[in-house]
């Protein structure tokens, strides 16, 4: 037995798989067509005790740690969910950790607790038309005016930005560079705050993505998260968790794609024999299995280390970066081969593997592009 396979965590895995099959999988094709998830799903997941796994009960969460959250992700994918579903239903995983880390009880009561209860939806606003992985170059400006900040600028590629009730937003309050960045919680109904565009995407169709515009938006100064000009540190601090979560999504998707491919190869006859009897297919499946096992082992080791290692520890940052890149490379290979094994059916929108193929492409971009991650790893390794 490992910490991933205790009786309690086996029960958690089973419960999340059952919930996914009952409440998510039957409706996912329709939500893909709708371009978003129903708000009601957040409440249902919260009532079931699955929405806020990994968040402390003291702030309204369901308790548990990153291992429990990772098991939940594995279970959702294993039962036919998707990373698009994960990104949308669990956007609070990147929207509220900065608020919790700040220790601001008023902000926690106003935004974190109702979000973890499924009553509100939050999102994170960092990426801009001219600044993605290069967070220090963002241009959205917030100027102090008495008891408020006046915000002007734009954000793009914001997950859950269409449905969100608030956006934890990175803004520039000081000079150029990382030292002039702050975080503000901005309510969607603030005057001058508009969803300027709902964005259409290659994948993650059930996850709404938005372009946001801020035109002289007045934000109460009390909505400042942490210290003024201290936002870059808060953002960087949370990247370890986000990258490990994406790594888990990657290897869990690879495992689901492999399982689907094996099942199809067993049932599909070609030239009078099951497809899986062909040596070339068996070799593909073995390679898919090997890469998935390696990515899972690497990521789980990093997840375990994160439980008792400061998020600012360079060795943990390196582990998260390497785990993400390795898992992304794994899932990109596995979904490609899975579609090939499915043949024409794999190219049909009605097949589940089609969704995983499209959804997997964003995993090497979000949370830090693969190339940026390699450069960061080189620096951490002293190369």
Image: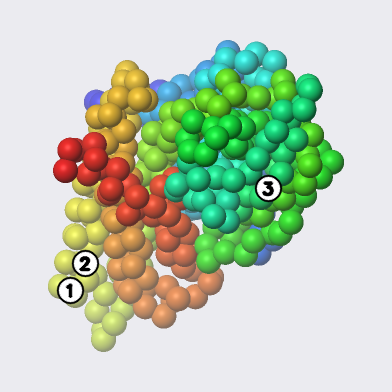
Q: Is residue 256 left or right of residue 25?
A: left
> Image point 42% across, 64% down: which residue?
357
Task: Report which residue position mark 2 lands on.
Answer: 284
- Label 1, label 2: how far apart the Cα atoms are: 6 Å
- Residue situated furthest bottom in the rendering: 271
Q: Position of residue 317 (x, y in %)?
A: 31, 33
- Label 3, label 2: how far apart the Cα atoms are: 48 Å
Q: Where is residue 100 in the image (x, y as percent from the top left)?
A: 56, 21
Foreground mark, 3 or 2, reads 3
Q: Earlier in the sequence, mark 1 or mark 3?
A: 3
Q: Classify the position of the C terminus by image quarter.
A: top left
Circle 1 SS class: helix
> Image point 58% across, 56% down: which residue?
129
Task: Report which residue position mark 3 lands on.
Answer: 153
Q: Label 2 near label 3: C-beta < 8 Å?
A: no
- Residue situated furthest front in the rendering: 175
> Image point 29% across, 82% down: which residue?
270
Quarter-of-image position of residue 271: bottom left
Q: Tell me if I can see residue 251 in this picture.
A: no
Q: Label 2 near label 1: C-beta < 8 Å?
A: yes
Q: Which of 343 and 188 is in front in this view?
A: 188
Q: In this view, does 112 lie to the left or right of 347?
A: right
């Amino acid at each position: 037995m490992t910490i991933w396979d205790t009786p309690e965590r086996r029960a958690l895995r089973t419960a999340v798989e059952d919930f996914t099959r009952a409440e998510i999988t039957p409706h996912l094709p329709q939500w893909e067509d709708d371009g978003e998830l129903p708000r009601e799903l957040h409440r249902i997941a919260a009532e079931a005790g699955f929405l806020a796994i990994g968040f402390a009960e003291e702030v309204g969460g369901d308790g548990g740690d990153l291992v429990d959250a990772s098991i939940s992700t594995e279970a959702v994918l294993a039962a036919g969910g998707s990373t698009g579903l994960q990104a949308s239903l669990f956007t609070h995983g990147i929207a509220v950790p900065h608020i919790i880390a700040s220790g601001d009880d008023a902000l926690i009561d106003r935004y974190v607790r109702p979000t973890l209860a499924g009553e509100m939806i939050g999102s994170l606003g960092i990426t801009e038309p001219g600044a993605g992985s290069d967070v220090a170059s963002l241009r959205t400006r917030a100027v102090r005016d008495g008891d408020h900040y006046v915000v002007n600028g734009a954000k793009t590629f914001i997950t859950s930005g269409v449905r969100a009730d608030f956006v934890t937003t990175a803004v520039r309050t000081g000079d150029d560079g990382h030292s002039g960045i702050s975080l503000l919680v901005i309510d969607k109904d603030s005057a001058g705050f508009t969803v300027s565009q709902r964005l259409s995407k290659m994948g993650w169709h059930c996850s709404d993505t938005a372009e946001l515009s801020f035109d002289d938006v007045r934000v109460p100064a009390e909505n400042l998260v942490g210290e003024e000009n201290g936002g870059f540190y808060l953002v960087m601090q949370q990247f370890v968790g986000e990258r490990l979560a994406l790594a888990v999504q990657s290897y869990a998707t690879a495992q689901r794609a492999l399982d689907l491919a094996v099942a199809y190869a067993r049932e599909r006859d070609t030239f009078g024999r099951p497809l899986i009897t062909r040596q070339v297919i068996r070799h593909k499946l073995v390679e898919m299995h090997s890469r998935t096992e390696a990515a899972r082992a690497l990521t789980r080791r990093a997840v375990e280390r994160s439980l008792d290692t400061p998020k600012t520890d360079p060795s943990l940052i390196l582990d998260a970066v390497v785990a993400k890149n390795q898992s992304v490379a794994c899932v990109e290979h596995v979904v490609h081969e899975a579609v090939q094994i499915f043949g024409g059916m794999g190219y049909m929108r009605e097949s589940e593997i089609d969704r995983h193929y499209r959804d997997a492409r964003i995993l090497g971009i979000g949370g830090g592009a693969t190339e940026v991650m390699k450069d960061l790893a080189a620096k951490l390794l002293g190369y």
